[in-house]
Image (cartoon, rainbow, N blue to C red):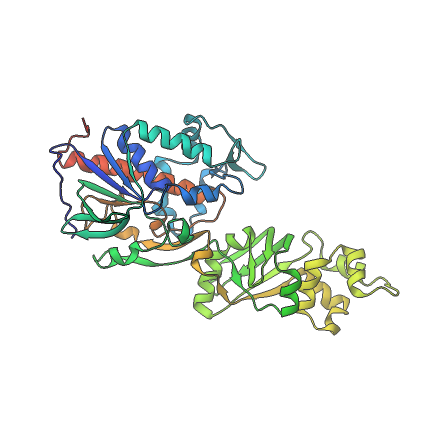
Amino acid sequence: MISLTVGNQGNHGTVAIIGGGPAGLMAAEVLSQAGVKVDLYDAMPSVGRKFLMAGKGGMNITHSEPFDKFLSRYGSRQSSIKPMLDTFGPEALRAWVQGLGIATFIGSSGKVFPVDMKAAPLLRAWLHRLRANGVNFYMRHQWLGWDDGMLRFLTPEGEKKVSADAVVLALGGGSWARLGSTGAWVPLLARRGISVEPLQPSNCGFDVAWSEFFRSRFAGQPLKSVQASFSNSTGAEFCQLGELVVTADGVEGSLIYKMSALLREQIAASGTALIYLDLAPGRDKQFLIDRISQPRGKHSMANHLRKRIGIDSVKAGLLREALSKEDFDDPVRLCETIKALPVKLLAARPIDEAISSAGGVNFEVLDERLMIRSAPGVFCAGEMLDWEAPTGGYLLTACFAGGRVAGEGVLAWLRSEGKSLSAS
């Protein structure tokens, strides 16, 4: 059991929050608004670095789809995530953003964005509010664990020990280490007997053994308007329209990310995963055969493909990659492959390249307040918990919600310990 050392603040509670992403900042907001003294520590020179990176291509905060569908995005962890979303769900998050003076809108896909599409104005407004509430920020403080209940940090001035009445760990997962999510906390908790599932890449690309010719010619090119399908050995199925990107090492992009959990699990179970791409969704095989079977005169099959059914460039390259010359020139075999082109995935890309990570602190070791049962006063929130979700606003929403639940949990715990919630 981890024993926390109470500082010299008498009956006034002081809370240390370790990690300055959305979960940690939201916990800081809940606590500081209640009058609690909050000290927030982060290993990086500034907070919210991964949050800002997420906003580079447009700050997708959440999603407007019906709640049941939204909840389904969390897969096997729906029951663990639901209480968080019941506390602070997509609508509440949108209203909260509005309260910071940032208007939002719903895009054509149902995704919710700030009107300026940027993360930086939101983060600036939020930090201004937190500082006004009295939150203290300590940057370049790398958490090293505990020493006799004291929190240990490595700082530019050397090691520092800190006491607190409660701690919120919001240390992130294991992706994009240069932005702060290093996963270095895993052994620190494991040594204390806290169950942590291994961190794995999520929303990630996958390796494919492309030929050198295909790699050199098509790496970096998008595959638009394709339908990907996959079924694993347990009967789980995926079939969705979208786009992906061919890379030098394999494939990535939104369509791949949506099924990354299924693909990763299949590779772990059998060594590879086989997906099928429909390069001409909306057109049936017989229609394609009829078009391709028309006389092509002196045109090559590649030109014939482009003229008759609009398949060229990277799609034609994929067909060349999958078929022998004889099969490529056979209209029936060619069209069968257009409708179901096999792509064998060999491995997930490294976790540091992934958008997010799976694995983390088991929900089973936490109570309903997200407090570690074996460590009273220590709470966990955000991506360091064992859940995953696709891109589309689901990751951020659960991080915000988890931070709020943890913050409210700390308040309840401080009250139960007889601590005043006012720092004054």
Residue in front for this viewpoint, 73 or 122: 122
Q: Is residue 404 visible?
A: no
Q: Is residue 248 visible?
A: yes
Q: Position of residue 171 (x, y in %)?
A: 32, 48
Q: In the picture shown, does residue 320 fall above or below 246? A: below
In the displayed structure, does residue 251 sit left or right of residue 307? left
Image point (69%, 63%), residue name: 317
Which of the 4 quarters of the picture holds residue 187? bottom left
Q: Position of residue 205 (x, y in %)?
A: 51, 58
Q: In the picture shown, does residue 398 fall above or below 312? A: above
Q: In the picture shown, does residue 234 fall above or below 203? A: below
Q: Position of residue 37 (x, y in %)?
A: 22, 33
Q: Residue furthest front?
A: 157
In the displayed structure, does residue 300 sit left or right of residue 101? right
Image point (72%, 68%), residue name: 333
Q: Residue furthest right?
A: 297
Which of the 4 quarters of the picture holds residue 22? top left
In the displayed structure, does residue 57 sit left or right of residue 277? left
In the displayed structure, does residue 14 sit left or right of residue 256? left
Label tally:
0
Image point (51%, 67%), residue name: 346
Q: Position of residue 209 (x, y in %)?
A: 57, 69
- Work out which quarter of the rendered image holds the C terminus and state it: top left
Residue in front for this viewpoint, 288 or 88: 88
